[in-house]
């Protein structure tokens, strides 16, 4: 089987090239010929007209995102408590002993309570968001 090393002067041909290939030219040939006419676009151009502003666009202040505020406050509170615990070796040792002394039932109860807290906060924030959306719809 011959390889390119046996015939270094020959270049491999691309599939579909040769005497039966459709009329195509390479980019180098097109740049040298200087007769590059742009091809017609495949898709019609998008409209550049501006869209009218709908009457339902709110003109007042943007709504307050209470979910972001509440989750941010909870994150700051968690980070503050963590920094307070970690900043003192005595507090860190106390928390370590408390966690180590938890029974499996108490650990599960703690996890369930924390999960319940996340669910309750999410539900309250969802209700607040729904109330805000309903109020905006009624005011329009």
Image (tube, grey):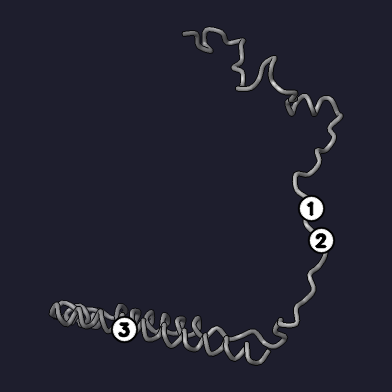
Closer to us: 18 or 112: 18
Q: In this view, does 88 lie to the left or right of 105?
A: right
Label 2 crowding class (10 Å Cα cut-off): few <14, some 14-19, many 20+? few
**Which residue sits at x=56%, y=88%?**
132
Q: Which of marks 3 and 1 is nearer the N terminus?
A: 1
Q: Is mark 3 on a helix, strand or loop?
A: helix
Closer to us: 58 or 97: 58
Marks 1 and 3: in contact by CB < 8 Å? no
Label 3 crowding class (10 Å Cα cut-off): few <14, some 14-19, many 20+? few
Quadrant housing residue 27 = top right
Marks 1 and 2: in contact by CB < 8 Å? yes
**Which residue sits at x=86%, y=28%?**
34
Q: Is mark 2 on a helix, strand or loop?
A: loop
Dot label at residue 45: 1
Dot label at residue 116: 3
Instruction: State the separation of the CA atoms marked 3 and 1.
Output: 54 Å
| Position in image of residue 41 (x %, y %) | 78, 44
Label 1 crowding class (10 Å Cα cut-off): few <14, some 14-19, many 20+? few
Marks 2 and 3: in contact by CB < 8 Å? no
Dot label at residue 48: 2
Dot label at residue 140: none
Closer to viewer: mark 3 or mark 1:
1
Relative to 45, is 67 above or below?
Answer: below
Relative to 73, is 22 above or below?
Answer: above
**Which residue sits at x=74%, y=25%?**
24
């Amino acid at each position: 089987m011959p390889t390119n090393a046996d015939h270094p002067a020959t270049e491999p041909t691309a599939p579909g090239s040769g005497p039966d290939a459709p009329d195509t030219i390479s980019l180098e040939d097109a740049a040298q010929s200087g007769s590059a006419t742009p091809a017609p676009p495949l898709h019609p151009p998008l409209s550049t007209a501006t869209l009218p502003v709908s009457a339902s666009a709110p003109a007042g202040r943007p709504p307050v995102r209470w979910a972001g505020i509440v989750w941010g406050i909870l994150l700051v509170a968690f980070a503050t408590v963590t920094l307070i615990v970690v900043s003192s070796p005595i507090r860190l040792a106390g928390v370590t002993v408390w966690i180590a002394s938890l029974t499996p039932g108490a650990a599960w109860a703690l996890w369930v309570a924390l999960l319940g807290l996340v669910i309750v906060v999410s539900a309250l924030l969802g209700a607040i968001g729904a109330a805000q959306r309903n109020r905006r719809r009624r005011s329009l």
